[in-house]
Each structure stands twice: as C-alpha cells, then as structure tokens.
C-alpha cells in the first residue's frame, strides 16, 4: 500500500525517534511504500529548532522518501505562520497515496487534503493529535481562537473523510473530543513508543559497563537518569537538587539535553555537585542507551515522548502526575510526583532506594510489560488497521 505521512503542522527531524520517524520506518518494514511530506522545520546539531534553507527530496536509510516543502510565495511570512505550502495538492496528486496519515492537522493546507479525498473516494485518512491544554492551548488566544475556532473548523471539514482521530495520550483523546468536537466514536488512543528493532539489538549490561567506564563511574552505583529539554517546565533542576541533597555517594544522576538560556546559571551551579554528571545533548540511539543502563529514570515535569521510551525500555520510572497522562503506568513500574517539590522528590527516591523488594517488583513489571505496550512495531500496525 502507498502511505503518505504529512508532517506539516510542526517539525520533522531526520534520524530521530519521534513518532513521525518511527511510524514511517515500521510501515516500510511491514511492506508498504512510504513517503513523508514535511515542512522545513528541523533541529540543528545542538538539538535546537531551526529552518532548513531549501526544499529537498531524499530516501532515508530506513527506506522511506522524505520530501521537504517550503512555504508558499508570495506573502511568505504569512504563509509560514498559517502553514500554506508550495504546490501541496500537486505533491499529493503525484504521490497517489492510498492512505494518508496526518501528524496533527493544525495547518491551513488541510483544505487541499479534503479536495484530494473528495476526488479519491477510496483513500483512507488517519489523524493523530499531540496537542492538549498543557502544551499548546494554554493561553486565551491559543485556546479560544486557534483551537476552538480555526482548527475546530478544519476538524469539521476533515471528519467525513477520516477513519480515526488518534490522541497519543488519554489527555489528548479528551482534547480531540472537547476542543475540536470530534465524534467520540472516531477517537482512539494511539500511544507513542520505543524503537523495538533498535532496542532488541542492545545488551543492557554491556552498555552500562561501557558508559560507566567512559565517565569514570562505579558500575555498581545506583544510576538515575533524567533529561530532554532543560527548561523550567521540565523541572530537571529539581531532580538535580534532590539527588544532591540525598548525600549518597552510591547514587549518581546522569543528565542529558539542551539547557534553556534562562536555566543556565542555576543549572551550572548544580553541576558542581559530585553526584551529578551532565552528558550533553544526545541523539536517539544514545538516549536509548542511557535509558537502558539506568536503574531509575525520572521525568518530573511536562510530558514528552521520552516517557514512553523509558517505559518501553523496561526501566523503572518516576513521573510528574498529570491527569490523563497515567498510561505510562503498566501496573506498578513507576511512581508519580504530585508537587513541584524537592522534598517530595527526595522522599520518593529514598523510598525506592530503601525498599529493595519494592524496587525489585517495579523492575520486574517494567521489563515484563513495558515493551509489550510501547513497541513501535505493534503501534505502527495498529495505526492503520
């Protein structure tokens, strides 16, 4: 089957393990012909958002085609804001998709998809949603104008042609129903996950020894990992404070990611603590290595795809509690934090360290159930059933 994935609402980043990368990869592995039509928005070498200079077409090492498309001219700046693209309908017509998978539909060229679908009655369309009232619709303008008016209008236009609208968390399923007024019968959960093909080729013990040796860390230490975008909302500075205040020489915290400018002074002051090791920005492969070598992974702020990857890697976790984002609990693999508070974090970590049977049980559940729920080979298949 010919599948076209549309990454025009936000970014597409080559060689990463976001859902936009993983679904095309596994659809190729499952025997489909796959094209990604993407915006020019990407990440630079430091993991920061950037705009690529030119349109391009390439075939990835996974075997799917990526067509990078620029915003329409004239009125370039307006079209960049509204997300109108060069010759978008012509691209669809040339690719002749039998199935279109839209990664978020907050771009105004959605009308072209409706036009294509109305002329090609057999095409299947699926849409996912990575948006909620925490990460996007958090201001009056965003909530009431963009999501409740503009994107709700486009959702209404798309709905007759769409087989399923997927929320990637239960909270985002609610967002589809409430913000866009999507028919609940068309809304389902499609979780994000981990690259199980890559995961299955890794040896946890060898990876742990390799990195501990390179970093000069005793491999018998209790290793905690946190990271991602290091800004105020992710609360990574609170984990750093908590581990430093534990005062346990046998506990080490590995931190990865890019540091937001407003956090640099505080972050660098916390790095002076002996228990904390900053490993910089990591690519997808290395992130998975750190999730595998760790005894515990802590994400104490807003949600990211790293949550599901950590669970899929089979490592016990601590997460910030958000209503509608508890699907990462597969039956006892994780603990939740209910406050943005260093003392609570110290208490939860100390409890895990002290109660060895409790931790042993967390680890057993994580290993037994994590990958089973969050493997992209299964997610990709379910996505287009």
Image (spheres, grey):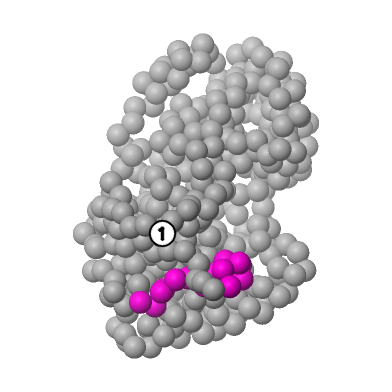
Magenta segment includes 84: yes
The structure residue drawn at horizontal position 57% and vertical position 43%, both measured from the top left corner, is: 48
For the stretch drawn in magenta, what is the main secondary structure?
helix
Name the residue rendered at 41%, 73% in the picture: 88
Q: What percent of the width, then of the height, locates residue 42? A: 49, 51
Q: Residue 358 at x, y = what percent?
A: 57, 30
The percent coordinates of residue 177 (x first, y second) are 59, 74
The quadrant of the rendering that contains the N terminus is bottom left
- Residue 95 location, quadrant: bottom left
State whether residue 333 appears in this view.
Answer: no
Q: Nearer the viewer, residue 53 or 276?
A: 53
Quadrant where the image shows the C terminus: bottom left
Q: Residue at x 60, y 76 (%)?
A: 151
Residue bearing the label numbered 1: 55
Q: Is residue 144 visible?
A: yes
Report the front residue among 131 and 335.
Answer: 131
Find the magenta span and give its range: 75-90
For this view, does 344 lie left or right of residue 328?
A: right
Residue at screen point 35% across, 38% down: 199
Of residues 8 and 369, which is closer to you in this image?
8
> Total label count?
1
Q: Determine whether 197 is above or below 39 in the image.
A: above
101 with respect to 270 (left or right): left
| SS for callout 1 | loop
Q: Is residue 48 above or below residue 243?
A: below
- Quick one: 213 or 249, which is closer to the camera? 213
């Amino acid at each position: 089957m010919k599948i076209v994935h549309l990454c025009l609402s936000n970014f597409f980043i080559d060689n990463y393990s976001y859902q936009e990368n993983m679904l095309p990869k596994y659809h190729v592995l499952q025997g489909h012909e796959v094209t990604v039509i993407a915006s020019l928005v990407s990440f630079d070498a430091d993991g920061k958002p950037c705009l690529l200079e030119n349109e391009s077409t390439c075939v990835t090492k996974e075997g799917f085609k990526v067509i990078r498309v620029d915003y329409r001219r004239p009125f370039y700046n307006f079209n960049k804001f509204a997300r109108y693209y060069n010759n978008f309908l012509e691209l669809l017509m040339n690719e002749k998709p039998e199935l279109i998978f839209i990664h978020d539909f907050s771009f105004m060229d959605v009308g072209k998809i409706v036009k294509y679908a109305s002329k090609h009655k057999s095409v299947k369309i699926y849409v996912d949603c990575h948006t909620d009232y925490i990460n996007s619709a958090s201001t009056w303008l965003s909530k009431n104008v963009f999501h409740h008016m503009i994107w709700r209008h486009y959702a209404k236009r798309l709905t007759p042609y769409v087989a399923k609208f997927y929320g990637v968390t239960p909270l985002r399923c609610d967002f589809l129903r409430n913000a866009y007024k999507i028919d609940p019968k068309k809304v389902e959960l499609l979780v994000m996950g981990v690259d199980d093909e890559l995961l299955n080729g890794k040896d946890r013990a060898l990876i742990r020894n390799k990195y501990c040796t390179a970093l000069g860390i005793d491999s018998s230490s209790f290793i905690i990992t946190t990271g991602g975008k290091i800004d105020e909302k992710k609360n990574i500075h609170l984990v750093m404070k908590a581990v430093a205040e534990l005062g346990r020489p046998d506990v080490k915290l590995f931190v990865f990611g890019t540091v937001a400018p407003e956090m640099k002074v505080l972050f660098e002051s916390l790095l002076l603590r002996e228990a904390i090791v900053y490993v910089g920005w990591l690519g997808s492969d290395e992130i998975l290595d750190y999730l595998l070598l760790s005894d515990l992974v802590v994400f104490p702020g807003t949600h990211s795809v790293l949550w599901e990857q950590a669970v899929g890697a089979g490592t016990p976790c601590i997460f910030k509690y958000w209503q509608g984002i508890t699907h990462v609990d597969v039956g006892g693999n994780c603990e939740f934090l209910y406050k943005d508070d260093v003392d609570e974090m110290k208490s939860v970590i100390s409890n895990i360290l002290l109660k060895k049977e409790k931790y042993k049980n967390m680890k057993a559940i994580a290993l037994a159930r994590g990958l089973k729920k969050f493997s992209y080979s299964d997610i990709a298949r379910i996505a287009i059933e």
